Amino acid sequence: MAGAASWSFSESDFKQIQQHLTAFLRESNARCALLVDRTGQLVATVGEPPQFDSTAFASLTAADFSANDQLAKMIGEPEFASLVHQGEKESMYLADVAKRVILVVLFDQRATLGLVKIKAKGAVENLNRVFEEMFNRVGAGPTQEKGLLEGAEDEIDRLFG
């Protein structure tokens, strides 16, 4: 599978991504938005800097999203387009972007899940356009299921092995 190492942003792409994420954070009251590619590489972070190892977090996020894709298939869904992990004080919303990248939104009590979901829908549509244009321009074809977790599994082994 081709991950972030096989494509790169132009300055214009990156500015567009930052603008969309910044507007989303402002509209949703979420704290932080991260983009993680499906191989577990951190692509971008906007908002409050995470207070944790973002490299490990990106790998675990990719593994989580991939595991949930498999769970969706088991119950007869092609995929889950989004996931929610709701905690007492901190929560996460994850959404697929262009079948290649995961939008991870970190939010607390200042934001409601409903508002995050509504505002994320528009942000994902905007990000889909940016990524699809970028992938078409650089010739990065559709992702392949095989090898999806290779990097994430290595990171998990390193962290917990």
Image (cartoon, rainbow, N blue to C red):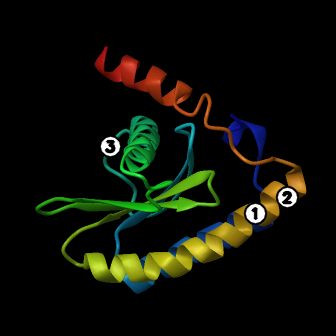
Q: Nearer the viewer, residue 154 or 9?
A: 154
**Which numbered mark, 3 or 2, is in the foreground of this view?**
2
Residue 63: quarter of image: top left
**Which numbered mark, 1 or 3, is in the foreground of this view?**
1
Quadrant containing the N terminus is: top right
Compared with 18, 67 (above or below) is above
Residue 128 lies, in percent from the top left, at 66, 68
Q: Name the residue carrying label 2.
A: 136
Q: Are marks 3 and 2 in contact (CB under 8 Å)?
A: no
Q: Name the residue carrying label 1.
A: 132
Residues at marks 1 and 3, CA–CA distance in whole angstroms: 30 Å
Left or right of 148: which side holds 142? right
Quadrant containing the C terminus is: top left
Residue 42: quarter of image: top right
Left or right of 99: which side holds 152? left
Q: Secondary structure at mark 3?
A: loop
Circle 2: residue type: Asn
Local crowd at mark 3 within 10 Å, few (<14), some, or many (≥20)? few
Circle 1: residue type: Glu
Which residue, as the protein is rendered here, is positioned at the far top?
161
Local crowd at mark 2 within 10 Å, few (<14), some, or many (≥20)? few
Residue 33 lies, in percent from the top left, at 45, 63
Who's the residue at 75% across and 63% down the image?
A: 132
Left or right of 56: which side holds 17? right
Who's the residue at 34% across and 68% down the image?
A: 31
Who's the residue at 29% across and 20% down the image?
A: 160
> N-terminal of the two: label 1 or label 3?
3
Q: Are marks 1 and 2 in contact (CB under 8 Å)?
A: yes
Circle 3: residue type: Phe
Q: Secondary structure at mark 2?
A: helix
